[in-house]
Image (cartoon, grey):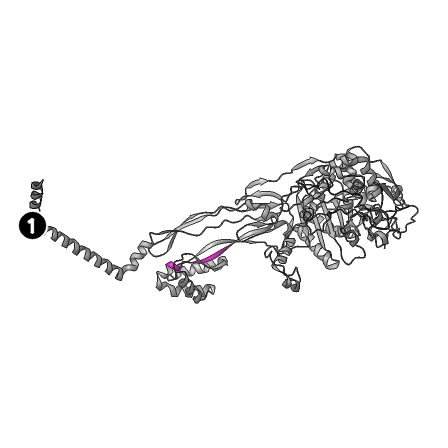
Amino acid sequence: MEKSSAKLIKKFSSRMQARLLLVFCVITLLLVGLIGRLVYIMQTDGERYAKQVLSRQSYVSAVLPYKRGEILDRNGTVLARSELRYKLILDPKNLLMNAEYIPPTLIALKDHFNIPEETVREILDKRPNSQYTILAKNLNYKEMNDFKAFMEKNSAVKSVWFEEEYVRTYPYGTLASDLIGFTSTDNRGFFGIEEYYNEELNGTNGREYGYYDSSLNIERIVKKPENGHSIVTTIDSNVQRIIQKHIKEFNEETGSLNIGVLVMNPNDGGIIAMASNKEYDLNNPRSLEGIIPEEELQAMTPEQKLEALNKLWRNDAISSGYEPGSTFKPITVASALEEAIINENTTFHCDGGEEVGGWYIKCSNVNGHGEVTLEEALMKSCNDALMQIAAAEGRDIFYRYQNYFEFGRKTGIDLPGEEAGIITALQNLNATELATASFGQTFNVTMIQMAAAYSSLVNGGKYFQPHVMQQIINDSGATVKQMDQLLIRQTVSKETSEFIQKAMYQTVEVGTAKGAKVEGYAIGGKTGTAQKYPRDAKTYLVSFLGAVPAINPEIVIYVIIDEPQNVPRQDNSSIATEFAGRILKEILPTLGIYPEGEIDYLLPTNEEDQDNNNDDPDNNGQDDNTDNMDNTNNTDSSGDTQTDNGQNNETSGSDSDHNDGDNSATDDADEVGDISGEGNADVTGETETNTETDTNTTTDLNTNTDISEEELINSEGEMEDDEWFFDEEEFNGAAIGPMDE
């Protein structure tokens, strides 16, 4: 072992050590030279090498936005669109690496976009490592294109580029605001079609990948975005514009708490127009200026402003409930016809009221309409006859048909925020409740429910689901989805539908809805007057629900005026019928519905007309308001017709036409009674009958039906079993007074 070590030591001679030292010295000198060379390069040509390194560093640009789909009316008019705009982007890090480009770039930004040089220098100081800083937004194409052209001619302007963005715009401002809704900056829809079809309207973002070349120009690789689909609606923008114009004119001339107008196609459920007087600018939906007085607006807290905005954005036609009143009477009659409980030749004796459940409930004509046919019961809006019909039906049949017509549940319209309404549970539908429900009291509906139900009555019995979407098309115009008729059920037979059409025509021609007449057209419809809670406030909703033409209609129109202002009496349904007539006169030609020849084909013979107008021989053409007006202030015009000279034969609240020469202040006050909203003659004619339960079922047009009743509503929107019925404490005899003699 020792010999081996000695041999190794002996072999590593001094000569070898000298050579090793020489190699080490040479390597050291080479390293020193290399370091010197690197230092020299960094000092003399470092910027060029830095650019070469930077050109090999890839980056990912900002997302390329998709274009949200358009919303169009039935004729192709664009109601909502996304317009292309541009963002101006600065890369501070890159610009700082090329100091000679800073001055010309800053000057160019100031000259073209009025961006102060101090602002850009502050960004360079505070964000030197940033490669993405937005300098300006919402630039139009000309601004972008002019600057790009300038950059091509001036190579000293660097580290600036543009990104596309889309801004949602509404060309017609307030038009159809209840239906369309609006979006946030991140393309999220709020309310209306924008919210309901948000997923279809939105698309998929693209991406842009790129790198700097040796001249610091950006080379890009682009993955294109996928644009959203467009929604072709059933809305007619011309009809919508006319309706909103008339609402404004009415509020300027007369005034109201709110107005709801709905026009739909009864033959497929398509919504043609829908509006209220709470319109807002879709391009600036969060502004209350011009809607709330300036002084009041300044005094509001942020919470109050938010509450006001939510009320403003709310679509009352689908979200607010009320008692329908006499517009519901055709449904009561149709249900009995379907069950063969009555027929077209059935007659009724109206003696001024009915004693039901221990209470005497008056008809609008306290002296009685006398002997009336089924058709006359609707024409005159006779509560007495309707109560007799409902009693013959019984609560099982009545309740079943309420469900057939989709009351107490949502219609399924393709708009967000729909409410279900409230109907009385079957076990609580006792004699008194059944009687008052027969003429539209003590339960709660929405405008869309009533319009859809009435449409099925006049279109042959087919209940179509209401909808606003007609077609979904892609970016290339190809159809993605087509909305066909969605038939829910057959509610009534064709024969029943034909009877209702004729009876509603007679109601407009010689009955309680004369104010809705339009020269040259056959129009059918029913008036309504609903007394709001609290009853002693004597405030009312007046309405008209009709169809044109009266036979085989092409449109259904529903008008509600909530608390008309500056009128002698709010409980005057002629306010609504005349308002509907003005709207129809203008929208019918717009929809291509024109007068056709003679329209008196449904009018009765002279003898029949004379009989209709002399149903109360004791009245002698005099207005019989004096017995009831002071006590009820809301008797029903239902059941009121006129003599040939225009005088009112019935009691206060008669639905005679203002234009026929009747000067009664109660002209067209549609069958309002003190029990509830309309069509109710009061129980005694002296004091008001209290049908109000612990929870108010009638809300204003701008009130959510479910706010106060939330704890009472089950999953179907009905009242819980232990609520919403008359009990002895609620239906207080002492509060009402003695029955009429």
> Quadrant of the image for the C terminus?
top right
Q: Could one spot residue 640 in this view of the protein?
A: no
Horizontal side, residue 724 vs residue 141: left or right: right
Please count the marks in the image.
1
Question: Where is residue 404 shown, x and y percent of the image?
Answer: 71, 37
Question: Where is residue 733 shown, x and y percent of the image?
Answer: 84, 46
Amino acid of disc 1:
Arg
Q: Looking at the image, which residue is at 44% across and 63% down?
A: 109
Give the residue number, with chain letter if any, for mark 1. 15
- In terms of image quadrants, where is residue 546? top right
Estimate how packed mark 1 is, as few (under 14), some (14 to 19) or many (20 or more) residues with alpha carbons within 10 Å.
Answer: few
Question: Where is residue 189 shown, x and y percent of the image?
Answer: 57, 49
Identify the residue at the far front of this view.
2
Front residue (pair 443, 178):
443
- In terms of image quadrants, where is residue 414? top right
Residue 365 in the magenta stretch? The answer is no
Q: SS for tag 1?
A: helix
Front residue (pair 546, 122):
122
Q: Could one spot residue 298 in this view of the protein?
A: yes
Secondary structure mostly seen in magenta is: strand
Q: In the rendered image of this protein, does residue 131 appear above or below residue 365?
A: below
Q: Which residues are magenta?
A: 84-93
Horizontal side, residue 42 vs residue 74: left or right: left
> Quadrant of the image for the N terminus?
top left
Identify the residue at the far top of this view.
340
Question: Where is residue 309 shown, x and y percent of the image?
Answer: 63, 55
Front residue (pair 302, 601):
302
Horizontal side, residue 14 vs residue 730: left or right: left
